[in-house]
Amino acid sequence: MSEENPVATVAGGGLLDRRLFLKKGLVFSALALSTENALAVVNNAPRPPWTAKPGQPFSNYGQPSQYERKTIRWTMGNAMAAGNGVSCTPLQDLEGIITPSGLHFERHHNGVPEIDPAQHQLLIHGLVEQALTFNMADLQRYPMTSVLCFIECGGNSNAGWQSKPVETQVGYFHGMASCSEWTGIPLRILLAEARVKSSANWLIAEGADASLMNVSLPLDKALDDCILALYQNGERIRPENGYPLRLIAPGWEGVVNVKWLRRLHLTDQPVMARNETAKYTELLPSGKARQFSFVMEAKSLITQPSFGHKLNAKGIYQISGLAWSGRGKIIRVEVSADGGKTWAQAQLQEPVLSKCFTRFRIPWHWTGKPAVLKSRAIDETGYVQPERAELLEKQGAHGYFHYNAIVSWEVTANGSIHHVYA
């Protein structure tokens, strides 16, 4: 396989067939050695110091390697209120689809409460035949289910509304999105036990943090796929992610996935709280305001390579990224290396699940010339991730929430990568 003609391209800019990595006989190593020469290298190399002494003893809870300490959440606090702010998932440093619990993004309005699970209770009341209270031991008796799904803050990627592209790592721009396995009780089971009245149309969820965070969601969603989660990625939910109890509403904006859940109030109308009036409501170009835009639309972004990475030599690279949709499964991700003139279909990593991160990959032959990398997601409803100009035309140039436009990375002739609008 020569550098001049590694394999036939399937789109402009050097994009290769997505199945290239499955072909036999391909050599991607920087230096290929014969068996004899490889043994010589091993035998002549000095013995690494860690092979000459016993390693560390057992630990009660595993920690990342000291050499991976750079893979951390990036925090953005509020100078006026230390407990109000966000921390972002370092998407550019991760692989696969599962976000480690300790790297799941955070959004807090008044700090992380220290809740004693022995004293915490959940109340279900309002338009029900029978008000119910549960302690955490009560909930452990109920049948549980697990769901792998993403949670994305409605304000994720909002720097994209700015007139000039932001130059920062992908996780600091788009990192208010994470994906976990959540395990808990289907909410419909407890609502059936409370016997919801026919006049109820909405459910108001309230948290036990110091801001008493509360939001409304339609009863239909609560009865569909919401769960009361006790576990995240196999262990009890961590405090910053909602311990000891969190509402999970798959595919819907993060604000309705209420953490530290303490109360579910059945009503005939929404509560019109701050986070569904002053926030999460946007003025459209028509002059009308958009409210209760719960679903997170299809979105994708290339995480490797992206801003902060550098291509050091010509040749074949793997383009890798994430796609997701609040409406269901991702059925296709297309990648462009020529700024959107031509597109090639990426390989989707199995399993491809509904309302869950989907990892995509495609090989790319970089010739050392400037290029613009883009990805676009298509979900099972047929929705296609829009170009930025298309999104601005629909929602206006002064938005803040639900930014899901195609992201473009410019690769320069020296291999550096920058965020551009293209």
Image: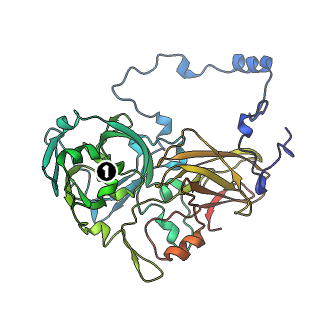
Q: What residue is shown with label 1?
A: 223
Q: Is residue 118 left or right of residue 414?
A: left
Q: Is residue 88 above or below residue 135?
A: below
Q: Is residue 8 above or below residue 342?
A: above
Question: Split into 4 quadrants, where in the image is the C terminus?
Answer: bottom right
Report x, y in % for residue 108: 30, 56
280 or 114, nearer to the observer:
280
Report x, y in % for residue 193: 19, 44
Please state which amino acid type lies under the numbered disc 1. Answer: Leu
Query: Residue at the spot x=34%, y=70% of the render?
Result: 279
Q: Is residue 28 above or below residue 41?
A: below
Q: Can the viewer see residue 167?
A: yes
* Element type where label 1 sits in the image: helix
Question: Split into 4 quadrants, where in the image is the N terminus?
Answer: top right
Report x, y in % for residue 390: 58, 72
Q: Is residue 103 left or right of residue 376?
A: left
Can you tell which quarter of the image residue 6 is in?
A: top right
Can you tell which quarter of the image residue 347 is in?
A: top right
Can you tell which quarter of the image residue 376 is in?
A: bottom right
Query: Residue at the spot x=12%, y=49% of the render?
Result: 130
Q: Is residue 339 left or right of residue 348?
A: right
Q: Residue furthest front?
A: 198
Local packing at callout 1 (Cα closer than 10 Å; few below 14, some 14-19, many 20+) is some
Query: Residue at the spot x=24%, y=49% of the render?
Result: 260
9 or 127, nearer to the observer:
127
Query: Residue at the spot x=66%, y=54% of the render?
Result: 334
Q: Residue furthest bottom?
A: 287
Color theme of the render:
rainbow
Q: How many marks?
A: 1
